Image: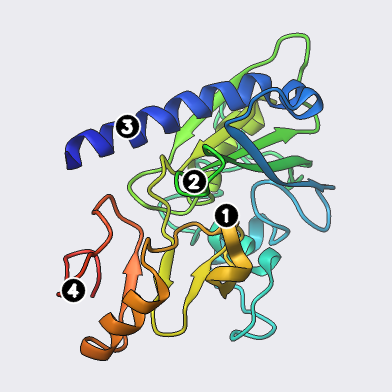
Amino acid sequence: MKSNVIVNFYAVGFIGLFILGSTLVQAKEENDLSWLRFISEKSYDGKSNDLVTAGLGIEAMENGVVPQFSDSLVPTSEELRRNSIFTKGTAGFGVIYGPNVDASTGSLVNNELIAGSEIMAYADNGSGDENVSLLLQVPKRFDWETPCVLAVPVAGSASLFRDIATIGYWGLQKNCAVTYTDKGLGNGFHDLENDTVTRFDGIRLTAQDAGIDSLFTADIADDQRHSFLNNYPHRIAPESVMPAPTLPLSPPASIF
């Protein structure tokens, strides 16, 4: 049963990924894909912010100085995006590969940042229970006459932004659109004691406020949650393919 669920997650993720890359603009205008729910669309000018370094610039990525939050207890969605994209400058980043390196020759080019649009969406049946996160980056220089799409399914339950600087940049350099998916295995979790969850942009909200925009909300009623916490306080439920706990409740593998 578990293996079937995993296979289904991967299938949905891959199918959604390729369809998203090729039909997103048309689908958004016509709204003819019922399974595709648009979350956000942002444009980056390649100066104050960009698709590859989140405005940090090549030098900051090379130096490996981790960016700080204005308020670490209440980070903004843009700060969370920036820190998710940040890649410590090791293993030759910015010297033998990266957005300032010509992939065809290996030579260094200018520090121009990549401008373009970034669109986030969910593949879902409308219930919010099958949220497969999808991200599309379209560089400003995207060639609509000879379009190309690079598909990047992120490893495991990693962030959608994890592979932008190390893989996605390759396609963006070549003026290709790049699509990413977490395959339905995104790193959301439900703090059962405070009843808070992770929204698509990393912001923590109550389960009620996040609604179907939650990366993951445990399938457990309030009375069950309180009953569980009475016996096992201070618990969180991470997103997994394990079934939700049922009464009588004991600590299942998916809650620790």
Q: Which residue is mark 1?
A: 212
- Asked if disc 1 and disc 3 are in contact, CB closer than 8 Å, the reply is no
Q: Position of residue 157 (x, y in %)?
A: 36, 52
Residue sitting nearer the eye, 20 or 244: 244
Q: Position of residue 158 (x, y in %)?
A: 40, 53
**SS for dot 2:** loop
* One can see residue 105 in this view: yes
Instruction: Answer with mark 2 or mark 1, whichever residue precedes in sequence.
Output: 2
Look at mark 2 in the image and give the residue it sits on. 131
Question: Is the Cβ of the residue at disc 2 closer than 8 Å to that at disc 4?
Answer: no
Tell me the amino acid under the disc marked 3.
Answer: Asn
Front position in the image: 31 or 69: 31
Q: Amino acid at mark 2?
A: Asn
Which element type, helix, strand or loop, lies under badge 1? Answer: helix
Q: Is residue 253 left or right of residue 118?
A: left
Residue kind at label 1, given as amino acid type: Ile
Quarter residue 240 falls in = bottom left
Q: Residues within 10 Å of mark 2 (few under 14, many from 20)?
A: many
- Label total for image: 4
Q: Which tag, 2 or 4, sits closer to the chain's start?
A: 2
Give the residue drawn at x 29%, y 85%: 229
- Give 218 or 226, whichever is nearer the viewer: 226
- The residue that label 3 is drawn on is 8
For marks 3 and 4 on the same chain, the one whose residue lies earlier in the sequence: 3
Residue at mark 1 to residue at mark 3: CA–CA distance: 20 Å
Q: CA distance from mark 1 to mark 4?
A: 25 Å
Mark 2 and mark 1 residues within 8 Å of each other at the beta carbon:
yes
> Does 23 sit above or below residue 37?
above
Where in the figure is residue 142, as x and y percent of width and height?
A: 76, 24
Q: CA distance from mark 3 to mark 4?
A: 27 Å
In this figure, which residue is indicated by the disc labeled 4?
Answer: 249
